[in-house]
Amino acid sequence: MVYFPEVTAPIAYEGPASRNPFAFKHYNPGAQIGGKSMAEHLRFAVCYWHTMRGTGGDPFGVGTMNRPWSSARETMDAAFEFMAKLGVGFWCFHDRDLVEEGNSFDESCRKLDEIVAYAEQKQAESGIKLLWGTANLFSHPRYQAGAATNPDPHVFAYAAAQVRHAMDATHRLGGKGYTFWGGREGYDTLWNTDMKRELDQLAKFLWMAVDYARQIGFTGQFYIEPKPMEPTTHQYDSDAASCLNFLREYGLIEHFKLNIETNHATLAGHSMRHELQVARYAGALGSIDANRGDELIGWDTDQFPTNLYLTTEIMLEVLAMGGFTTGGLNFDAKIRRQSFETSDLFHAHIGGMDAFAIGLKVAHAMHEDGRIKELKAARYGAPVAFASLEECESFVRANGEPIVRSGRQELFENLVNDVLMSVR
Ligand code: XLS
Ligand code: NI
Ligand code: NI
């Protein structure tokens, strides 16, 4: 069965002059930039939940998507056909995306094992690799009050058992990482919440995962994915800084990196670049969920990234950390409800990949150009060398009033456009 008949051969790079909507205009996987191929820099991943399982349903209406696949196996076949045609090297999943829960925990595990064996075969045939796996600890009604942070230890245990199997699956598929996103780890109201107890439980849960990874020899990278709200009113993994603080407080910092998602950054009232920098300066920038929000809607709308300023800023941070190691760019993004045809999945991913290819080229060109870096360095005087308040005072008495200088924001912004417009 062919699920994507509209695309008969792998999407090719045809260059900026091409008018073919099923071609890359900028993403040329083998092209070298700064000693690495574009494919190695960008490490694109397709996300199973939105791309394969997304229905187009929203709080006001049912699903709209036209999908010729339904069983777990059909979905897996369709996924690998899609990824091969798109030329993407990685994928990501939640356990429950691969196959629905069974009627008992035991049955759920069996069903998961079965489909994971099939995925293993598909990976071997295609060479497509697993960027990360995770457990869905938020959809089932048992998790309505959270998983690790649930007031009921029975639910805690259920979630931990589920994580054990999701980690086994990730390990078996050679996953480069394993992600924890808070899901419902947070609260709806502080009136019914013991925050301290919930945070302690969350840390305990993560420690169990770290211990289990050691036990089974899973050496992939653990990630935490910050998000401030939605579905809860406050999530404990709020933003990069609060995740880092939590990890430090509970001694977990060396075991985790962050998986930063654009739309979560904006929901937290930060720019994506802010979140990436906070993570990078802590040596904890691991991976990226590539999407964007809508300027006018305050939800996690998970749109495909097309804004070149955004992709440029992201790639500047990725280059500044020396590139991805285990991580990559996972399109945790969904096509709009009215884009219900399978071809729309191609348009969305092609656009996102081209936008990141341009971001990479511009970010690299900015490094080569050097003007922004120079101007920024010039803005700072010599490093602060004063050792005490007294020393500062004598300096001021001897030197008087400092000369205030322009911050040159507009000039900086002009340089960004200068480079952006010069790149082909
Ligand atoms: C939801 C999150 C989720 C994680 C994986 O907002 O982005 O999709 O990436 O659980
Ligand atoms: Ni995400
Ligand atoms: Ni999200």
Image (cartoon, rainbow, N blue to C red):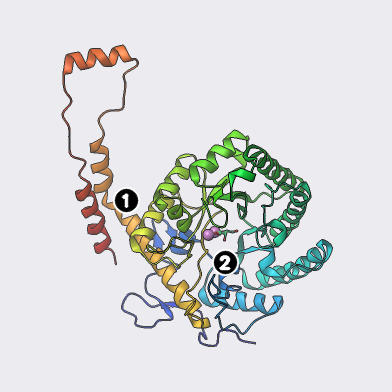
Rendered residue at 66%/60% (across/down):
136
Q: Nearer the viewer, residue 392 or 199?
A: 199
Point out residue 343 in the picture as x, y percentages from the top left corner. 49, 82
Residue on which the image places disc 1:
367
3D distance between C-alphas at marks 2 and 1:
31 Å
Quadrant for the N terminus, please: bottom right
Q: How busy is the neighbourhood of tag 1: few (under 14 within 10 Å), some, or many (20 plus)?
A: some
First in sequence, mark 2 or 1: give its number.
Answer: 2
Task: Give how far across and how far down residue 396 sits, in percent.
Answer: 21, 17
Mark on residue 47?
2
Secondary structure state at the residue bearing disc 1: helix
Q: Can you say which quadrant of the picture contains the C terminus?
A: bottom left
Q: How many marks are shown on the rendered structure?
A: 2
Mark 2 vs mark 1: give the one in front: 2
- Quadrant containing ligand 1 reads bottom right
Q: Hey, what amino acid is under mark 2?
A: Cys
Three-letter code for the amino acid on which mark 1 is drawn: His
Q: Is mark 2 within 8 Å of ligand 1?
A: yes
Q: Position of residue 123 (x, y in %)?
A: 66, 69
Q: Nearer the viewer, residue 364 or 339?
A: 339
